[in-house]
Image (cartoon, rainbow, N blue to C red):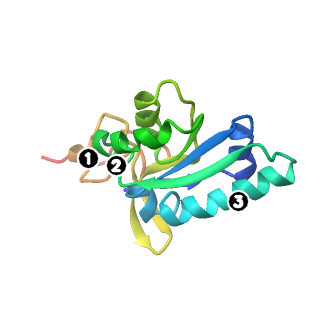
Amino acid sequence: MIVADRKHVPEIRDMIKNHRRVLLVGCGTCVTVCLAGGERETGILGSALRMSLKLIGNRGTTVDECTIERQCEDAFIDALAPRVAEYDAICSLGCGAGVQALAEHFPNTPVYPGLNTQFMGILQSQGVWAEKCAGCGNCRLGEFAGICPITRCAKRQLNRPWRIA
C-alpha cells in the first residue's frame, strides 16, 4: 500500500491561487485506504481550499472535485480527459506516480501535488502504518530474511550478522 499525507491547505492554496479553474482529482485506491486522497478527502479539501481562497481575498479561483478509480492507469485517466479540458490546472490527490501520470496525459495543463508520498507500508491498526518498503529498486529481501534493511534498519546499512544459506 502506498502511504501519503495531505499537504497543508495554505501550501496547496498558494500553488493554485493564480489559476481561474482548478480540478481537484482524488484517487480511489491506495491513498483512499490511508485516508489521504479518496473521494471523501477530496471533498473536504475542496471545501477547505475554497474557504482559504476567500479568506485571502481570492474570489476568482473556482475549485471543483472528482475522484477516479486509479490515477496510475491510462484507462481511468483517459475517461477524465473531457472534464480536464474545462480547467486550467489540476491538483492531484494521488501518489507521486499518479501526479506524474496526469502530467504526462495532460502536458498543456499544470498538475500540482496535493499529497506527500511517504512510503509503501502495511496497516498495523486503524490510521497506523508501518513502513516496509522505500521502493529503492534494489530489493534485497531474500538476503535479509524478508526484512528490508533500508526501511527497517535505523542506520539503513546492508551489513548483516547472519547469512542465509
In this rendered view, identify the residue nearer to me: 146 or 33: 33
> Depth-wise, is mark 3 or mark 2 nearer the camera?
3
Q: How many callouts does the rendering have?
A: 3
Residue assigned mark 1: 141
Label 2 near label 1: C-beta < 8 Å?
Answer: yes
Residue contact at pointers 3 and 2, CB within 8 angstroms: no
In the shown orientation, is residue 164 left or right of residue 5? Answer: left
The residue depicted at 34 percent of the width and 49 percent of the height is 148
In the rendered image, which quarter is residue 131 located in?
Answer: bottom left
Which type of secondary structure does the marked residue at label 2 adopt? loop
For the residue pair 39 and 160, the one nearer the viewer reads as 39
Tell me the residue that label 3 is attached to: 48
Choose between 105 and 100: the one closer to the eye.
105
Amino acid type of the residue that numbered disc 1 sits on in the rendered structure: Leu
x%, y% of residue 124? 41, 71
Q: Assess whether mark 3 and mark 1 are in contact (beta carbons under 8 angstroms).
A: no
Residue 31: image quadrant is: bottom left
Q: Residue furthest top?
A: 108
- For image coordinates 39% across by 57% down, the residue present is 30
**Residue 10, horizontal then vertical, whole percent:** 75, 49
| Quarter of the image with the N terminus in it | bottom left
The residue that disc 2 covers is: 148
Question: In the displayed structure, would residue 156 be above or below residue 123?
Answer: above
